[in-house]
């Protein structure tokens, strides 16, 4: 200590117009209070800034929802799911127990926000060509119109893909009088690339009937797959959409998935081959094709430099959820990525599902981290 200078065991501060003595201990305590307060503020802020729980809860609890296709339109999240109902149809390999009749659209202001049900957006009775089973839909937007793409069985019990339009993202949607010409099978997913071109991916084996079209003609005798385990697996399909978004603009192509040596995945490779539930997203210029492996219940993905592929298989990224089916969509919001998916937490029954959302994380190389639901 320097001569002539005195130190005091307290500091005087002016608090509310009065001089107050503050001891060292008090300063330490105040620092602690400050740190705690900062931590509380930070954690509240983080929850508003789209941090989601690791064990998400169902987003909708008053009706059953599945196969959620999420999109951001005008800065808001819209979800286009299937609407599961109890139709008392026994479970079979053809998915007869998924006997849905309509679609509801849901919206959220932010990823943690309230979920709003906008009611019935399209009913099977208003689709002139459809007979039954309104399965997993998707949506797209172009030039002031919203498009709802949906699979349904036609009056001959053959799955086709329909399209319906609306001026609002929440519908109601008006169906075109006939399915998309040349369409078949299920699970349409529409991806609009950065150059404005839109592509539709679709297909699903077993109950989704993709195997019945492998010669180009419908063959009802093929119930599950081709039963050729050592031959290339059946592929999902892709076609660019026409400018009016109502038709295929080119012949349908195979979405080929190959291993790291460039060899096609085989029909017997049930852990890796495509089953149903296609989704496409683009990350850092690469195209990520993701899908369900069906009877092995994984979500898997493959990447390419082209929206047409071939796609190189990268791995699975979600372990089986509760319930037989697994189906997802992936969106980016404010620099973070989210996966919408379903399980059967509410009902415990495969055909009565509930949608959920959680964050999708990646490694520095873009690899999607494994999710354990
Ligand atoms: O919801 C009916 C079907 O179950 C979907 O089309 C498949 O993807 C599976 O989730």
Image (tube, rainbow, N blue to C red):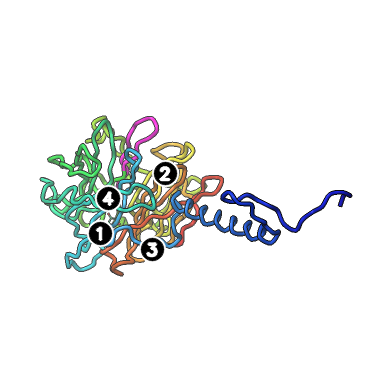
Q: Nearer the viewer, mark 3 or mark 2?
A: 2
* Residue 314 place in picture, x, y as percent: 49, 50
Label 2 close to label 4 by CB (< 8 Å):
no
Range covered by the magenta-colored residues? 190-202
* In magenta segment, residue 192: yes
Prevailing secondary structure of the magenta residues: strand
Distance between the alpha carbons at the discs numbered 3 and 1: 25 Å
* In magenta segment, residue 90: no
Instruction: State the image quarter where residue 177 is shown.
Output: top left
Which residue does the image show at 39% across and 45% down from the upper left?
331
Residue 321: which numbered mark, if any? 3
Instruction: Classify 290 as above or below 55.
Output: above
Which residue does the image show at 54% across and 49% down from the upper left?
363
Residue highlighted by disc 2: 333
Residue highlighted by disc 1: 223
Mark 1 residue crowding within 10 angstroms, few (<14) / some (14–19) / many (20+): some
> Is ligand 1 closer than 8 angstroms to the Cβ of mark 4?
no
Labels 2 and 1: the sequence-earlier one:
1
Q: Which SS class for mark 2?
A: strand
> Is ligand 1 closer than 8 angstroms to the Cβ of mark 3?
no
Label 3 close to label 1 by CB (< 8 Å):
no
């Amino acid at each position: 200590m320097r001569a002539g200078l005195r130190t005091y065991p307290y500091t005087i501060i002016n608090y509310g117009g009065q001089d107050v003595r503050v001891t060292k201990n008090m300063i330490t305590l105040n620092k602690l209070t400050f740190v705690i307060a900062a931590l509380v503020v930070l954690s509240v802020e983080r929850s508003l800034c789209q941090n989601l729980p690791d064990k998400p809860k169902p987003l909708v609890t008053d009706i059953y929802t599945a196969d959620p296709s999420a999109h951001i339109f005008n800065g808001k999240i819209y979800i286009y799911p299937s609407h599961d109902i109890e139709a008392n149809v026994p479970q079979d390999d053809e998915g007869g127990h998924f006997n849905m009749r309509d679609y509801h659209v849901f919206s959220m202001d932010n990823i943690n926000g309230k979920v709003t049900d906008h009611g019935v957006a399209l009913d099977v009775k208003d689709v002139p060509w459809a007979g039954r089973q309104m399965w997993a839909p998707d949506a797209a937007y172009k030039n002031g119109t919203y498009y709802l793409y949906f699979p349904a069985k036609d009056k001959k019990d053959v799955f086709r893909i329909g399209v319906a339009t609306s001026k609002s993202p929440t519908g109601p949607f008006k169906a075109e009088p006939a399915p998309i010409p040349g369409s078949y099978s299920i699970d349409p997913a529409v991806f609009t690339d950065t150059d404005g071109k839109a592509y539709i991916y679709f297909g699903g084996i077993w109950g989704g009937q993709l195997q019945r079209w492998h010669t180009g003609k419908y063959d009802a005798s093929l119930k599950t797959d081709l039963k050729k385990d050592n031959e290339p697996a059946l592929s999902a399909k892709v076609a660019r959409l026409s400018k009016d978004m109502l038709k295929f603009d080119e012949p349908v192509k195979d979405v080929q998935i190959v291993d790291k040596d460039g060899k096609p995945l085989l029909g017997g490779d049930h852990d890796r081959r495509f089953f149903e539930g296609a989704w496409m997203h683009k990350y850092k210029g690469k195209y990520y094709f993701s899908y369900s492996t069906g009877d092995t219940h994984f979500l898997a993905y493959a990447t390419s430099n082209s929206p047409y592929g071939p796609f190189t298989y990268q791995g699975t990224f979600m372990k089986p959820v509760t319930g037989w089916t697994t189906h997802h969509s992936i969106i980016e919001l404010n620099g973070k990525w989210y996966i919408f998916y379903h399980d059967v937490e509410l009902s415990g029954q495969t055909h009565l599902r509930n949608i959920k959302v959680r964050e999708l994380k990646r490694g520095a190389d873009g690899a999607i981290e494994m999710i354990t639901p």
